[in-house]
Every structure is written in C-alpha cells, then in structure tokens.
Image (cartoon, grey):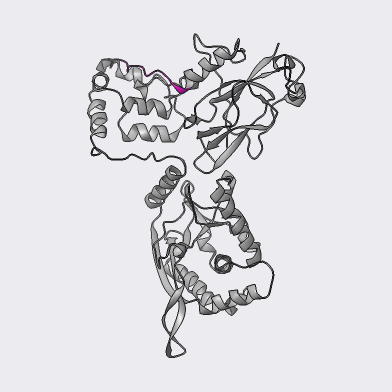
Amino acid sequence: MPQVMEFKLPDLGEGLTEAEIVRWLVAVGDVVAIDQPVVEVETAKAMVEVPCPYGGVVTARFGEEGTELPVGAPLITVAVGAACLPAEADAGAVATEGAPDSANAPRPLIGYGSDPSRPARRRRVRPGSAAPGAAPAGPAPAVVAVAAVTAPAVTAPPVTAPAAAAPAVVVAGPVPVISPLVRKLARDHGVDLRALRGSGPEGLILRADVDAALRAPAREASAMAPVVAPVVASVGSAAPEGATRIPLKGVRGAVADKLSRSRREIPDATCWVDADATELMATRAAMNAAGGPKISVLALLARICTAALARHPELNSTVDLAANEIVRLPSVHLGFAAQTERGLMVPVVRDAQARSAESLSAEFARLTELARAGKLAPADLTGGTFTLNNYGVFGVDGSTPIINHPEAAMLGVGRIIPKPWVYQGELAVRQVVQLSLTFDHRVCDGGTAGGFLRYVADCVESPSVLLRSL
C-alpha cells in the first residue's frame, strides 16, 4: 500500500514566517520526482520555487493561487509507493515499498533548510480530521481537502463572557498566531484575536481569518465586545466610496515595515555636497576604451565607498540595542537600490571591499538581472552593512535617503549633468553631481560623516586620490 506523505511549507530562512502562493507547478494526479519544484511562492523578499522532498503522485494541494500560508502549513500530499503510479508513469520516481526508502527520504531543500534553533511543533489531530499519515481513498477526498483549506467557513464570534469571567479568558493560553503581520493587522483594526477561530493547521489564525472578521456584517459585529464593534465599523467608513485598497504585503509590505522601523529607531541626519564629476567620467571612458569588460559608474562609486569606509569604519556598523553597543563590522556587504516591477529591492554584494571595479560592475549586473526577473534568493537581499542609492537614474538631483535598517548609513547619488562650475578660477561647464549621506547619529558625529562625504567627493573630482588608498 502506498504511504501518503504530507509536505509542509518549509522555513525559507531570514526570519520569514509566511509566503503567498503565486503559481502551482503541479496538479492533483501528477507524478513528481524528488526535489522537483511543485509551487512558486512569493515571500517578503523574493520569488522562490519550492521543491518537494518526496517522489510519488500528488493527492492534494492546499491553497489556491493568491493564498497566504504560514511556515509549517501543508502544501501538498504525495502518495509514495509503486502501487500508486499509473501504468505509463515512470515507477523509478517513487520507492517500491510501502514506506519510503533511503533514496526517497526527505532531503534538505535546495537553497534553504529548517532552522535547528526552532523547536519542532507537535501536530494535534482535531476531532473529525484525518490522521497525518492517512491516505485519501481517491481523487474526491483530495478535492475536499483543498476546499477545506482554501475556503474556511467563517464562524460567528463567541458570546462575550461576563466581566467576572474575564481573567479566565486571558490566562486560557497563548493565542495561536505565528505571523507578526497578522497580529499587527488585528491590533491596528481593534480585532480581538481570542474571539476568532483559526482556519489554519491546529487552529492557527491566518490573515484570512482577520480579514473575514473585518468584513463581518453589522449583526455579527454587534455580538462582539462593545469596544471592538465601533472600531470595525469605523474602519469600513474610513475610505470614501470608489477608493482603491492595495494590501501592504509581499515586497511592498516588507519595504514599508523596514522604512517605518528605520524612522522609529534611528536618529538620522543628512549632509550633502556638490562635486565635479568631469574627471571621474573621463577616467571611466579611458578605462572602457582600453578594452575588456565595461565598467559602470556605479561600480566606480562603490569602489570609492569601500575606500571611504576603510577610513571611516564607524559608518560600516550597526547598533545592538539589547547590549547597548555599537558593533563595527569587519566586511563591507554593499547593498544597492534596484527598481523592479515588484518594487524597490536592495541586492547585496558580499565582501565588496575585496573586489575591483571590474568585479563590482559584473556583480551589479548579475544581481540586477536576477532582481528584475524575480529570481533573487532571500540571502541575496539580506546582510547588507552599507547601501549605495543611485537615484540619479530617475532624473533627480538630490534626496534625503532613509537608512536601510539595521545599517548605519546610506550614500545617495543624483544625476550627473552639465552645470556652470568655477574651474581653475574661471567659469566653465562641468559634469556636476550631488552626493548626500544619511547617517545614524548614534554611531558617529557630524565630523566623521563630513569626513567620509568629503573623501568621496574628492575621489569623484580627482580619481587619483583613490589610487593612493588602493
């Protein structure tokens, strides 16, 4: 007899707690091989194809496209065993015994894996539900399983207990919520999570459950606590008729959370300077004319930044609030802003201080192409220590960048355009750029920030200054 194996949404790393199903790559009844991608999901950081560690026949899919699932929620079930294969299928894709053999045992997923520091959750079987290892009798139960997950019934909220019983409700146990985004949504809209019955595994409360509570009719809202009902009603009337609501989720939600946290936690300050980039542009033209791979302006600016950080390491640091310490970092992992169809992304070039301008240029091109194709791994978007933001590509001269938390500084670069400039005592037309530095005032004072920015400007105006530090 074949054994049905349940594959759950794995821990995708980098602290991600949920993902949205973008596109199913298999259907119920398909034969899958070990490590074959079965679904494409979008996290707050990247698009990821999730491979299944089992080989066999897909018996159920959990969640329609567009559904958000928490880490640990079921994705698919796979019937493992030669007996479950159709006659024309390749029997080598699954084990020949009822239980999976060593060749078909779960493998660590490519590119990520489970976090050994996270305790395993014990699965509880609710009354009326099938045991974790039970196999569905045929295609019909598989469809029912999908429907049960994708279209949970909205239950009426319980009647509010008397005031004397309130302490018993509070100490009943932790609210079954994994996602901090779900908690924030409920808190912002005044929804009592203890009054909800979760539709996820083990009664887990999902975002859909909170959304359903917000959409509940007025007669159901009146059965809730008196404090909650007016808040839910006011949320619905906050926007005028015809307004469009755009969920803050995925990349846009992650950017919003990070920028908001940056403004809350970091006492930032900004300084800026205009620089004559004529010599820098001439140097780049000479380098490219000499043959070999082309060098980008961004790569030259990045090389200048790494040299400036070597002189002013205070700006390549982070603040540890728990220990009340400034942590100076040994390597420069340089983030750079890239605008894509999915929104603003900040890929990270590892160990940028050890790279040449040619190497930096190639790495910028590679990461930019992956970002625009939506194929960056979560690890490519995390771990930065300093960010270079070339907003000049949007045709603007200046800006006051928001620091990419938890970094300590960001250099912004405006467009390089011809402007009147006093050069060698005479008025001339030169290629001028505005440079702006936003920095965390906790890690350094204005003198350090000004010294960093002045060194960058000096290298832009006279690239030979940079050669002295190479």
Residue 228 picture location, percent across and down: 26, 27
Comparing 140 with 184, the one in front is: 140
Tell me the quarter of the picture where residue 212 sits: top left
Q: Residue at x 50, y 56 (%)?
A: 337
Comparing 271 with 139, the one in front is: 139
* Count of numbered labels shown in the rendering: 0
Residue 444 picture location, percent across and down: 45, 63
Residue 451 picture location, percent across and down: 48, 72
In this rendering, is residue 170 above or below 323?
A: above
Comparing 61 with 332, the one in front is: 61
Q: What is the chief secondary structure element of the magenta stretch?
A: loop
Horizontal relation, residue 173 to residue 216: left or right: right
Comparing 143 with 332, the one in front is: 143
In this rendering, is residue 359 above or below 179?
A: below
Magenta range: 150-158
Tell me the quarter of the picture where residue 401 sits: bottom left
Residue 13 picture location, percent across and down: 57, 39
Q: Residue furthest bottom?
A: 425
**The magenta stretch spans residue 105:** no
Screen quadrant of the N terminus = top right
Q: Is any part of residue 13 visible from this angle?
A: no
Q: Residue at x 47, y 60 (%)?
A: 409
In this rendering, is residue 181 above or below 260?
A: above
Screen quadrant of the C terminus = bottom right
Q: Is any part of residue 410 visible from this angle?
A: yes
Q: Residue furthest front?
A: 88
Tell me the quarter of the picture where residue 50 sits: top right
